[in-house]
Image (cartoon, grey):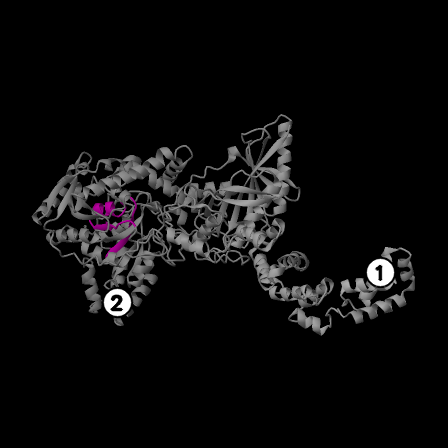
Amino acid sequence: MLNASLRQLSLLLSEKKISSTELTHEFLTRIKVLNPDLNAFITTDEEKSLNQARLADEMIATGRSTPLTGIPVAQKDIFCATGWLTTCGSKMLSNFVSPYDATVVARLDRAGMVNLGKTNMDEFAMGSSNETSHYGPVKNPWDRRAVPGGSSGGSACAVAARLAPAATGSDTGGSIRQPAALCGISGIKPTYGLVSRYGMIAFASSLDQGGPMAKSAEDLSILLNAMVGFDERDSTSLQREKEDYTRDLEKPAGGLRIGLPREFFAEGMSSDVSSAVDAALAEYRKLGATFVEVSLPNSRLAVPVYYVLAPAEASSNLSRFDGVRYGYRAAQYDNLEELYAKTRAEGFGEEVKRRILIGTYVLSHGYYDAYYLQAQKLRRLIAEDFTKAFEQCDLIMGPTSPTVAFNIGEKCGDPIQMYLSDIYTSAASLAGLPGMSIPIGFGNQNRPVGLHIIGNYFREAHMLNVAHRYQQVTDWHKLTPPESGN
Amino acid sequence: MRWETVIGLEIHVQLSTRSKIFSGASVAYGARPNSQACVVDIALPGVLPVLNRGAVEHAIRFGLAINATINSPSIFARKNYFYPDLPKGYQISQLEHPIVEGGCITIQAGEQEKTIRLTRAHLEEDAGKSTHEEFHGMTGIDLNRAGTGLLEIVSEPDMRSSTEAVAYARALHSLVRWIGICDGNMQEGSFRCDANVSVRPSDSETLGTRCEIKNLNSFRFLERAIDYEVARQIDILENGGNITQETRLYDADQDETRTMRSKEDAHDYRYFPDPDLLPVIIPREWIDQLGEKLPELPEARRDRYIRDFGLSAYDANILTATRELADYFEQAVRLLPEQSKLCANWIMGDVSARLNKEGLEISQCPVSPAQLAGLLLRITDNTISGKIAKDVFDSMWQGKGDSADTIIDARNLRQVSDNTEIEKWVDDVIAANPQQVADYRAGKEKAFNSLVGQVMKTSKGKANPAQVNAALKKRLVI
């Protein structure tokens, strides 16, 4: 049951071999046992989850079910959910119970999924290791000394440790793909604008994109069907005809032209990751794919550009956390200035404050042109690189992360090293392109390695197809971490 | 030294859309605090703005009315600053590519017409309100107004006196109401002025250092604040001082302006394009459609009234102060095409005076244009005198009869032009007033007027005054 795919679960549910209530109960019990150590969830609420499960069972009984009805899902704590504590991993929102649903939450609710709880994350999604969370670090289930990646570290951990059949994540510079890679699961960040951002607490609005995290590409495609869709409450949401992301899963991979960016296979990638990627590419060759070297000359600027633009937007997006209307407020203050200063000094963690300061700086009078505007220009150049590359290939592949999971505490004192975790993922984010990660084996200390697949705009169905073909001939995605750590 | 005043105005016009500019909450005024603030207005985590199409249309209508350029794409930007009544910690406004750029408006500066150029007009959201009363050392926040759509209209520094500034503000006030984008209610803050004021030696070409005066919520305050500020600046300069660029607040109670913040304290608003809102693309066809639906504008009407109705520029100006007044005038004139001047005089005179006295708007006038025309018709065809007409007007105002004719008949006010009857009244008056007759014959002209009055009184005002004059003269000469 724990390893069952979403299709298998759906079948068991519709054939009444198991009820949603039983399934939900099983996962909740598992969370109770394993979460105290893994720390993947910030909030669970048995009563709420089981109520939803009962409603799902009714849907099934009365023949109103969808392929996801009755299946539990873990929600990243960045998504507002009515009546749920929604912290975004921050002390600032440690008392915020949302009075409304994010569109993603509402869509999955409507599909009949059961909210298992809210998963841990880097504070306001700022981090690549889940260590910036106010609620403490999450452990990597494959090696509990290691980080799960971030910012969607709780979701990645929950799926990898089989605490949930699937989870939601959000990705600004790699926050779905990098933790998926480090935890040995599959995750996809769709084209910017496909998944509504309404109710997903904003970090960097022009980059943030929600997406699913699951055990396989097939599971991702089923989840994506429910998550994608135009939302009139999000002005950046795209109005497109509805797609079935499962439609091309079984198509053969023969004739596939895979682009390998010179810049992604250069210095910086550790050898264990490199060997695993080579092995995965060899698998694709067997499936009939061909390779073409492409160049993304500006991608080396992706991290610096990202660390100008994302903090700029964040510095403004996080201004609303001022202690006036909701959330944390400092206990002692003598005037308005102090209310703001103390609330924000006490309510935000170090990394969030660092980024607010960077963002405020790059938007300041006299620096705006030199930083923000220059970064915007480079962002366009980075996107144009991809456009050119896709004239030569169907998909781009490379490593998701330059290394396997590092140890908890290892990079905390060195933000620059931490930021380089997103060196391969941030370029696609800046271009608004879809990107995904699938497990392709293990590197040093038996920690998972992920393959990064970048597609052209709206090529999600094709990417999922290519990932699925690989997962049909390999078992990496079926392996489970040891139950009690090592 | 002679000084020249230079004034530019920034006017915030509250758009009369039903809902807010970036959310679906109502903008109705006066609701219970925070009852009209939805999750978007209070800036809960995760919420997003969605642009109100109506607000964009209002801005386009304004742009068309002043012959401006409508920018496409037009960009929304965030203006970042912390204040408790600014829920997001930034205001969504426009910096580069405002929706309206350029354009001009004509004002009446004394006898002269003058063209004032506009720099731009941009869309933005209003903030909420902080209230310090009734909370004993604490501040109450009402977010009902937060997110209400505003059009900020910025003029070039083209005005040279407080009178011109007021004329410009009035013209703009009239225009935004005319095209239906703002209710113009200044008490409720629907039309708010800030003035940029500087002075320079009258032979100088370069602009002096300016001060921005805020909080001018009536035309009277606008005028007085500018006058005070001009005198203050001249006084400083004439005493060898320098003007410091700063923002000043007008205090109506003290009738003075005071420093609010200096340039050094000015915020760095860190404007940047709002990533939550896409650039607004405004297709030509949309602008054309809105242009076709635009009513005839005040300037065009003013010209037409002068040309077609032979009104003076002064009268035409008054009658086009609001669209409702102009419409009232035209409806009356349509029924009485030969008497446009009479219609104009009555509307600017008796009708306006009565409206003023009772605190009513022209749209609430109990006497309809058709009723007024019916009344004026009876003056022109000598059925009643102008004096009796005022009486009939009063009855109509009070609802004592549907039409002038009904009232005239019911009260038997029809003017008497029958000479036999008039001569009889004249004879009666002469017989009853031998002293005045003697006085007149002795050369006291005033006695004549008294006798006319007596005849009119005897006739209960119905006698044709011209005939009374003639008959009296005839009788007294003998």
Which residue lies at the image location 39% right of the left edge and 56% below the top edge?
A: A98
B117 versus B397 height, above or below: above
Q: Chain of mark 2?
A: A
Locate residue A467, reporting x and y percent: 16, 51
Q: Which mark is residue A116?
A: none
How busy is the neighbourhood of tag 2: few (under 14 within 10 Å), some, or many (20 plus)? many
Query: Who is closer to the viewer here, A121 or A146?
Result: A121
Looking at the image, residue A15 sits to the left or right of residue A283; the answer is right
Residue A181 inside the magenta-drawn segment: yes
Where residue A124 sits in the image (x, y, percent)? 35, 46
Can see residue A404? Answer: no
Residue range highlighted in magenta: A163-192
Between B197 and B253, the one lying in front of the other is B197
Q: Is residue B111 magenta?
A: no
Q: Nearer the viewer, mark 1 or mark 2?
A: 1
Disc ID at residue A65: 2
Quarter holding the C terminus of chain B is bottom right
The N terminus of chain B - image quarter: top right
Q: Secondary structure at mark 1?
A: helix
Whether labels 1 and 2 share one chain: no
Residue A146 appears in the rendering: yes
Q: Are the residues flagged by discs 1 and 2 in contact, CB closer than 8 Å?
A: no
Q: Is residue B229 left or right of residue B16?
A: right
Label 2's element? Answer: loop
Quarter of the image holding residue B250? top right
Q: As rendered, which of A138 and B256 lies closer to the eye?
A: B256
Which residue does the numbered mark 1 point to in the structure image?
B450
Q: CA distance from mark 1 to mark 2?
A: 100 Å
Amino acid bearing label 1: Ser
Amino acid at dot 2: Ser
